[in-house]
Amino acid sequence: MALPEQQNTPRRFYALDGLRGILALSVMLSHMVGVVTGWSEQRPLIGAYISVIYFFIMSGFVLTYAHKANHKFLYFFLLRLARLWPLHCVTTLMMILIYAYNSRHMGYVAGHYIFDWKVILQNLFFLHGVTPHQFPLINDPSWSISIEFWASLLIPLIFIRIEPFKRLLIAGTFILLLCIQSAAGFIDMSFRGMFPFLLASSAIMLGSAVYALLTPERITKITTKNSFEVFLWICLVSCLVGIYGQFHNKLDYLYILPFIPLMLIDFQPDSSLIKKVFLSQPVQFFGFISFPLYLIHSSAIIIGLQYRSDSPVLSILMAGGLSIVISYLYAAFIDIPLYRAMKSKIKNLCHVP
């Protein structure tokens, strides 16, 4: 049962936008700290790979809400393509250009495969992680974008056709089986390299089930309890602990549990402190740039112009600042206007009011 539109149902999940921004920031900082520490296993934010699983869960939740009234597969497919592919294409080509510059000026180049047209096309066409065929990535964070694109298509095809509680049980069962299978937590390449796709699909299904199980009565019953605010803070701290220090073992799966209640922050009353935090301007700013920040920061890292061997902190601040500025400019002047224009055309094409 989908939650009906009414006064206590947010038209947009702004707190989740803010949460997504914090998670994207954690991924960026994790990679930058990794560079300046030589990818030490004792570095802060080593568990930021958990943030990517949180992205999948949120996608299932939000996309089920956004498309609950329209089950046209073509409409869903084209919207997801319009949302994910342009930035993926831009950042992939940007990485190639930077690597080309680096190769001519004695800079860092990941490998000669960067300039292989076959590898470039495989990267551009969202083929990573969705078939047993494996190939190197040009922009490392893009692995999750291709997987999310294809896994999210299961929402209109399969997930919304399953009764919500059964959907939750199936998602939970798959996640449990994946946990049993993997000794390395979320980072596993079993099932002929299809493990990440199966995990992403299960996480998206979990998020979809959580949204579908919401009813006005359940929301009211949960959010009117004073203890729920405290519970949300405990869940948030638990997730942050995992992002800060968790490192590739079966405990990865334990950190899924405290994230589920955080998807209800938007339903909290306006007096809620945790809601105020995630609706604050700084957090919302990172929510606004979260998608570009996630894909663009690798470009800032490999440019290398801001790297200072004598000051790792300054290196991180400079690379992070560059990533944030470029991400904002892209989001404000390209990403959002382009998506709105494409969405309008897709609506007309699919005859969606």
Image (cartoon, rainbow, N blue to C red):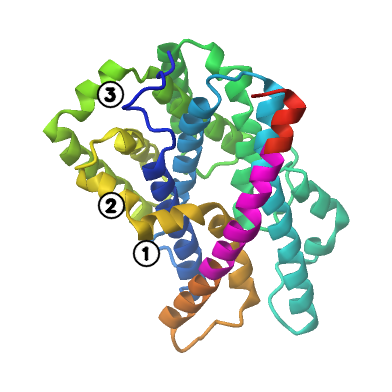
- Under circle 1, the secondary element is loop
Disc 2: which residue: 277
Is disc 2 in contact with disc 3, using a CB cutoff of under 8 Å?
A: no
Tell me which amino acid carries mark 1: Pro
CA gap between label 3 and label 1 equals 36 Å
Quadrant containing the N terminus is: top left
CA gap between label 2 and label 3 equals 20 Å
Tell me which amino acid carries mark 3: Ile
Decide which of tag 2 and tag 3 comes sooner along the chain.
3
Residue at 58% of width from left, 35% of height from top? 195
Tell me which amino acid carries mark 2: Val
- Under circle 3, the secondary element is helix
Q: Is residue 9 above or below residue 17?
A: above
Decide which of tag 3 and tag 1 comes sooner along the chain.
1
Q: Please identify, in this view, whether the residue under mark 3 or under mark 1 is nearer the observer.
A: 3
Q: Is residue 181 above or below residue 143?
A: above
User: Where residue 289 sits in the image (x, y, percent)?
Assistant: 51, 57
